Image: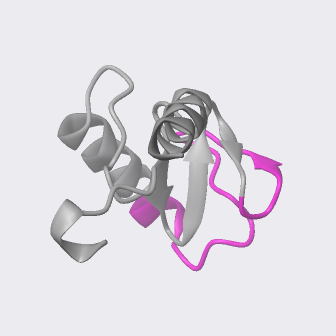
């Protein structure tokens, strides 16, 4: 059963590769998956509470912190084994 959970988890992680939270939005591949809008560094999600400048700064910070498509580990459901 644990093998099945691990394989299902890795498939989910593959789909969300490069996912980040920006301004209350779950963003992956140029889409806000929280609200369904196309987004970029210069085009923020209209539902985000951030200003245009704050959105651009958060986007840059996410790119710097997680380069080459890396995700924030919390986004993909990472949880320490000690917490299971």
Whether 75 is drawn above or below 83: the answer is above
Q: Residue furthest bottom?
A: 49
Q: Residue at x 58, y 48 (%)?
A: 27
- Give x and y (percent) for residue 83: 24, 75
Indicate whether residue 12 is drawn in magenta: no
The stretch in magenta equals 34-55
The image shows residue 64 at horizontal and vertical percentages of 21, 37
Of 2 and 55, nearer the camera is: 2
- The residue shown at (63%, 72%) is 48
What colour scheme does the image use? one colour
Q: Position of 12 compared to 34: left or right?
A: left
Horizontal arrangement in the rendering, residue 58 relative to residue 2 (left or right): left
Q: Residue at x 49, y 32 (%)?
A: 10
* Residue sticking out furthest to the front: 1
Q: Position of residue 42 (x, y in %)?
A: 56, 42
Which sits in the foreground, 74 or 52?
Answer: 74
Towards the viewer: 81 or 20: 81
């Amino acid at each position: 059963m644990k093998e099945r959970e691990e394989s299902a988890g890795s498939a989910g992680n593959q789909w969300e590769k490069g996912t980040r939270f920006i301004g209350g939005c779950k963003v992956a591949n140029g889409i806000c998956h929280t609200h369904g809008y196309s987004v970029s560094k210069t085009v923020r999600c209209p539902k985000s509470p951030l200003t245009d400048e704050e959105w651009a700064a958060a986007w840059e910070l996410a790119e710097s912190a997680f380069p080459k498509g890396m995700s924030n580990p919390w986004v993909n459901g990472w949880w320490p084994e000690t917490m299971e």
